[in-house]
Image (cartoon, rainbow, N blue to C red):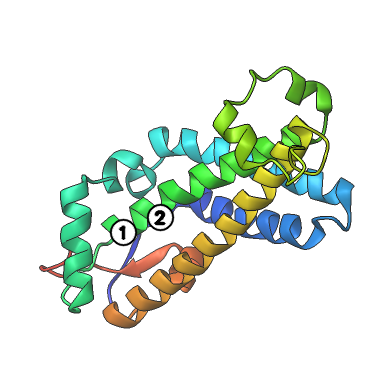
Amino acid sequence: MDMTRVWDLAVRLFHWGLVAAVAVAWLTADEWDDLHVIAGYSVAGLVAFRLVWGVIGGKYARFSQFLRGPSVVMAYLRDALVGHEKRYLGHNPAGAVMILALLVTLSATAFTGWLSQDPVRIAALPPAPQIVSLAWADDDGDEGDGEGGSGIVADLHELLANGLLLLIMLHLGGVGLASYRHHENLARAMVTGDKRAPAESDVD
């Protein structure tokens, strides 16, 4: 079978490094603060690298190659529902949306985690809108866990982390579905960097 290189070494190292960092951060939450913080900084650094590499990296790493408009994404999802979606050599339109969602959620999770480490950082933020304060208020009117802004940020950090877990599960489901539909192991491709060469009907 003819194979072609799709994922460069930088993308592969980023992907598996992020998997490891997120796993460590999740497992050490509320258990091992120092390691949790290190994992959080690792996540932030990896996301920053991916944003840069998405501009200057190889063909299939670039955002300009795989980001598509809403109409293309919706058409792909409609085709996927009936099992007629095209095979994309790089990220398919639904996968591209998931990448954006993951990067945004990872960034927000890392940022709120960084904020929660030091009350001075939180104090430097502009006041939260009243509707946000009320949303985090306890029955007695106190915000969050009784620590004011720190409570809001800590709660938001936890909410984002749980949302991230949901996105990861959806991502794994999408990878599994695409692997089954197109008869190729996408997880292995992210290790080797190689995928089956495109057929005439595939999108390069």
Viewer-proximal residue among 93 and 204:
93
Q: Which mark is residue 152?
A: none
Is 102 placed above or below 171 here?
above
Q: Secondary structure at mark 1?
A: helix
- Residue picked out by circle 2: 98
Question: Where residue 79 appears, x then y in whole percent?
Answer: 16, 70
Amino acid type, mark 2: Met
Q: Secondary structure at mark 2?
A: helix
Viewer-proximal residue among 141 and 175:
141
Question: Where residue 66 appears, x then y in whole percent?
Answer: 29, 48
> Looking at the rendering, in which quadrant would you find the C terminus?
bottom left
Q: Residues within 10 Å of mark 2 (few under 14, many from 20)?
A: some
Q: Quadrant of residue 29?
A: bottom right
Residue occupying image coordinates x 41% and y 71%: 175
Residue 46 visible: no
Q: Are marks 1 and 2 in contact (CB under 8 Å)?
A: yes
Question: Where residue 113 appears, x then y in whole percent?
Answer: 72, 40
Q: Is residue 172 left or right of residue 73?
A: right
> Looking at the rendering, in which quadrant would you find the N terminus?
bottom left
- Residue picked out by circle 1: 94
Q: Is residue 48 left or right of residue 198?
A: right
Residue occupying image coordinates x 32% and y 45%: 59
